[in-house]
Amino acid sequence: MAPSSLSGSDPFIDPIEEVGADEGLDDSVLVVGRDASLTVATDSLIVLDENLSQPKTLNCCGLIPSSGKTTQAIPFFNVLWAELSDFELTVTYARPTSKNAVRVASIHYLVEKVERRKIIAWISKLLDRAYGESQRRKRIKVLINPFGGKGSAQKWYLRDIEPIFAAARCEVDIERTAYRGHAVEIAAKLDPDAYDVVASCSGDGLPHEVFNGLGKKKDARRALSQVAVVQLPCGTGNAMSWNLNGTDSTSMAALCIVKGIRTPLDLVSITQGDKRTLSFLSQAVGVVAEVDLGTENIRWMGSARFTYGFLVRLLGKTVYPADIAVKVDIPTKASIREHYRKELSNRSDIDSRRDSSIIGDDSLPALRYGSVQDPLPADWSLVPHDKLGNFYSGNMAFMAPNANFFPAALPNDGYSDLVTVDGDISRSAAIKSLMAVENDTFFDMVHVNYRKISGYRIIPKGQRSGYISIDGERVPFEPFQAEVHRGLGTVLSRSGHLYEAKGVAINTGD
């Protein structure tokens, strides 16, 4: 199931059938002038204003004049700010202009000075409801990849994003990246006390760099827990935004960041050779890695290049032999569903969703399982996978629009979701697998081995060269080891504890 838009089919459907004039007014209702009132209702700001109605028009028979609506409902999620000047009340909000876009709009009312105390209290109540758990007036470090979105990232920022940040009274500091790895350097020098958020106008590559830059700091644990890393989708791959915001619209993502709730995020340490990096999204060996990295020559096809690449390799029954050792924590689909079901209602405080060993001011936590250069942990064993078709470990659900590869993934349960599929399955099963990802039935397929894990080591064999993808970035075709750190990173999400994807708790079969 594809993620729904922020506003649904009509974000201004009035949840209140009628605001009665004689029902009695309370501190939720503010009368502004003779013909207008503003009501802080259950989930929306209700604007009742005779002046909202359009000029009278004739009905279909051309006989009886009719007038437009006099009531408007603005969802609290869309309310950006409210303030009072000497004689004017202004409410600023994000108004949908289409199913996938919003623009800043505002309503203004002249008010009596004698009502000032009441209006200030009403504004406070409105903003409390509009922001809830979310921090107001976020301090945002914006990184713009000028090459993102085929060179359109800066234009999209100025047109779609900046007005929303400004209307929400965010403090913004902009810096443009100049070369690959620049965001790592910027994040490594960042003062964690100066910013609440680092927002990347890019694909998924810049957030990967930001996490790794923060991870290089002497106080990496504090920096990673204190500064939220987010994406303003301006690249080819915008998986981070799909998972946390449910959209790849730049304006809607900006609104989601303004209203985003701080959420701990599991990060994965990857050791390869003597190098240690952090992964926030996924690691892949096999068909996914080859499709992602081996189709750069047909990038002009857009997202269709992935489908094309999958079909070519799946139909060719390509295999990617490897020896694999895995620390499996939840082995069956039935137990994974139950684990996911329990997490649906887990609204515990933010610190309890981080591993206690990572809280502090120190550098990155020590590796419990050692590095790829160390002996294999005693309770791990290497298993040959000579017919491996796909090894895919995910920390988030969506890897691309409509590609919910890891429907049981959770932001901070302390596990990665591992999918393995043999490369010699039938062609019909291969095609069904591709279709199943888009219609959310991939998890239930018999030939899909799905487990929750906390670490693994993979050693490719039988190939001199190939593709290994870490967060969509190519790394050397060499053995590597992964280890999950619960809640090491921080992001902003809509829910505060789940991804914007269809999960796996409904189906009770294995």
Image (cartoon, grey):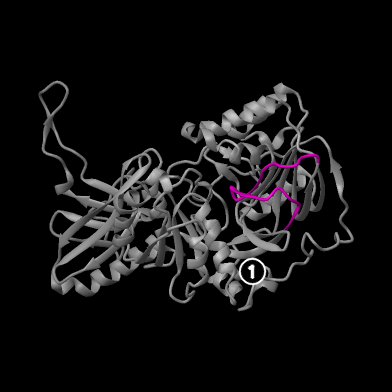
Nearer the observer, 9 or 407:
407
> Residue 2, image x and y in percent?
52, 37
Q: Reply yes or no: does residue 477 show up in magenta.
A: yes
Q: Quadrant of residue 90?
A: bottom left
> Residue 146, image x and y in percent?
39, 52
Q: Is residue 91 above or below residue 246?
A: below
Answer left or right for 404 relative to 62: right
Answer left or right for 231 relative to 429: left
Q: Reply yes or no: does residue 194 show up in magenta.
A: no
- Which residue lies most toward the bottom here? 361
Please tell me which residue is depicted at 79% across the width and 65% down the height of the picture.
370
Answer left or right for 122 relative to 201: left
> Residue 198, image x and y in percent?
46, 63
> Tag count in the figure?
1
Nearer the observer, 20 or 186:
186
Please tell me which residue is depicted at 18% across the width and 70% down the height of the picture.
85
Magenta span of residues: 462-482
On the rendered image, what quadrant is the C terminus found in? top right
User: Which residue is disc 1 drawn over?
Assistant: 352
Q: Is residue 107 visible?
A: yes
Tag 1 secondary structure: helix
Answer left or right for 226 relative to 40: right
Please tell me which residue is depicted at 57% across the width and 34% down the height of the picture.
306
Kind of residue at disc 1: Ser
Please tell me which residue is depicted at 59% across the width and 76% down the height of the picture.
219
> Residue 295, image x and y in percent?
57, 35
Q: Is residue 263 visible?
A: no
